Image (tube, rainbow, N blue to C red):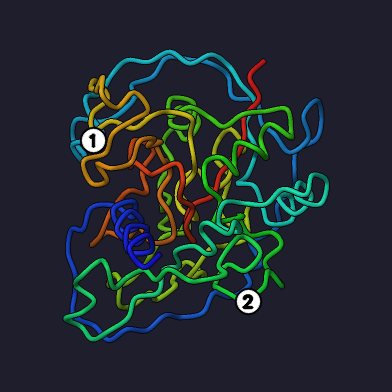
Amino acid sequence: MQKHHLALALIVAAAAGGFLGWSRREAAVTPAHASPRCQLSATAGEHPGMVWVPGGRFTMGSDAGFPEEGPAVATQVTGFWMDQTEVTNAQFAEFVAATGYRTLAESAAIGGSAVFRPHGDAAAMRAFVNWWQFMPGANWRQPDGARTSLHGMENHPVVHVAYEDALAYAKWKGRTLPTEEQFEFAAGSSARRNAAGAWTANTWQGSFPALNTAADGFAGTAPVGCFEASKLGLYDLIGNVWEWTTSFYYPRHDSTRADHPQGFDPAQPEEAAVAVLKGGSYLCSPDYCMRYRPEARIGQSRGLGTSHIGFRTVLNP
């Protein structure tokens, strides 16, 4: 079991994104606090809580970012419905109450999940293995480990959900998860700050991983809808939590491997099924992963959820 937990920690660290720099600061995290901005009004109509994303042609990826974001390719997407926000703890609880579903992190085989908890002195925090801890009992109900709860976090995005957990919820709703193309197209030109300099996404401010100033109002996850919506009326398509897609991950848009038909990530070569995560999370900062951009992407083992991975669903007409 100890070896299994170490493997989980290594996969989680890889999923957090490329390490670009580190500044020497003492470890400190400002607690998240409530914000008057969190006044989401869910859409009504044909599919309540969902937004229609018109189809169109766009350039997916980038040749100017991280290597895995290229090559930039012209891509066509047909119209689809997308959840206005990430799936919340309250919404996932409804699914569990109706079906009796148990997540992978709650299973006897796993019995916990990985929680972001950097520890050690300044030298120790240079190593990504000291950023995450496998917490026995951590799961969507107990996000920080055994004896913690969701009290006051009902409208936060559900986390500690593996791919199969997210897909099970989507199927219960009669939907599926977005493809990488759909997610990136819907995200459009989303950015962490707007032209006026206001925060428009929940990301990390300060020196990663030692200090989060929470200048945007949140040190961890934020309730959905706390930042301004996109032009389409969608929230948190960058920042807050990484989101599952149905697309298999390969290190380039134009690469596949016959020996890994369900995706391949050099950072986790033993994983047989690797999916694309999109959107970045509250852990993305300018001096670290910088993946709070629509074209950013990382690979994640389908069998692992963490404290910074969630999802939303889509409905294809």
User: Is 99 in front, or is 198?
Assistant: 99
Q: Nearer the viewer, residue 205 or 17?
A: 17
Identify whether 126 is placed above or below 58. below
Residue 271 x %, y %: 33, 41
| Front-lying residue, 263 or 205 | 263
Q: Amino acid at mark 1?
A: Glu
Q: Position of residue 159 (x, y in %)?
A: 56, 56
Q: Residue at 39% of width from left, 44% of height from top?
A: 301
Name the side, left or right, on which 290 lies relative to 213. left
- Tell me residue 171's x, y (percent): 68, 31
Which residue carries the number 1 mark?
68
Give the secondary structure at mark 1. Answer: helix
**The N terminus - image quarter:** bottom left
Q: Residue 235's spot in the image, x, y percent?
A: 58, 45
Which is nearer the eye, 195 or 145?
A: 145
The answer to whether residue 200 is seen in the rendering is no
